[in-house]
Image (spheres, grey):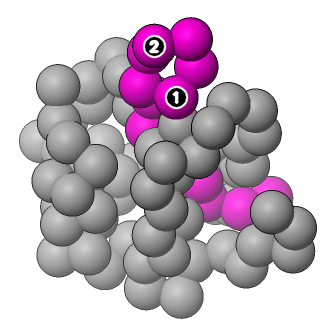
Amino acid sequence: MKSFNEVVSILTEARIPCRVKETKFHDQVEISIECGFNFPDELVDRIYSAFGGNLPKEISICADSCGGEVTNRARIAGGPKEYWD
């Protein structure tokens, strides 16, 4: 499993505009890569390419996520704004 810092580092190096959240659900940790609403399909392709075409199952790509306890967050390359906490 990739750590939160490793994921942020990979996405920062690739200059992919996104928001990354690490959340905890019932003793399970999940990392969400949030691209914002109406994100282009090419952005998902760039994310997969940044991870060498192999995205770990603990990492999800989505427009936005909610629920769970957010333990870490990072906004990369001017990724989507967060209008609420």
Q: Which residue ends up furthest to the right in the rendered image?
A: 84
For image coordinates 45% across by 69% down, the residue present is: 74
For image coordinates 87% across by 74% down, the residue present is: 83
The residue singled out by tag 1 in the image is: 24
Q: Decide whether the magenta segment is chiefly helix, strand or loop.
A: strand
Q: Quadrant of the N terminus?
A: top left
Q: Which amino acid does label 1 sit on?
A: Lys
Q: In this view, does 83 lie to the left or right of 52?
A: right
Image coordinates of residue 9 in percent, x first then y, are: 18, 66
Q: Is 37 a magenta residue?
A: yes
Q: Which residue ends up furthest to the bottom in the rendered image?
A: 78
Q: Which amino acid does label 2 sit on?
A: Asp
Marks 2 and 1, how far apart at CA: 6 Å
Q: In this view, does 24 lie above or below 51?
A: above
Instruction: Look at the numbered disc 1 and give the secondary structure of its residue.
Output: strand
How many residues crowd mark 1 within 10 Å: few (<14), some (14–19), many (20+)? some
How many residues crowd mark 2 within 10 Å: few (<14), some (14–19), many (20+)? few
Query: Are the residues at dot 2 and dot 1 in contact (C-beta closer than 8 Å)?
Result: yes
Image coordinates of residue 47 in percent, x first then y, are: 35, 52
Q: Is 80 a magenta residue?
A: no
The residue singled out by tag 2 in the image is: 27
State the extent of the magenta-drawn residues as a range.
24-38
Between 56 and 24, which is closer to the camera in this rendering?
24
Between 70 and 7, which is closer to the camera in this rendering?
70
Q: Quadrant of the C terminus?
A: bottom right
For image coordinates 43% across by 85% down, the residue present is: 77
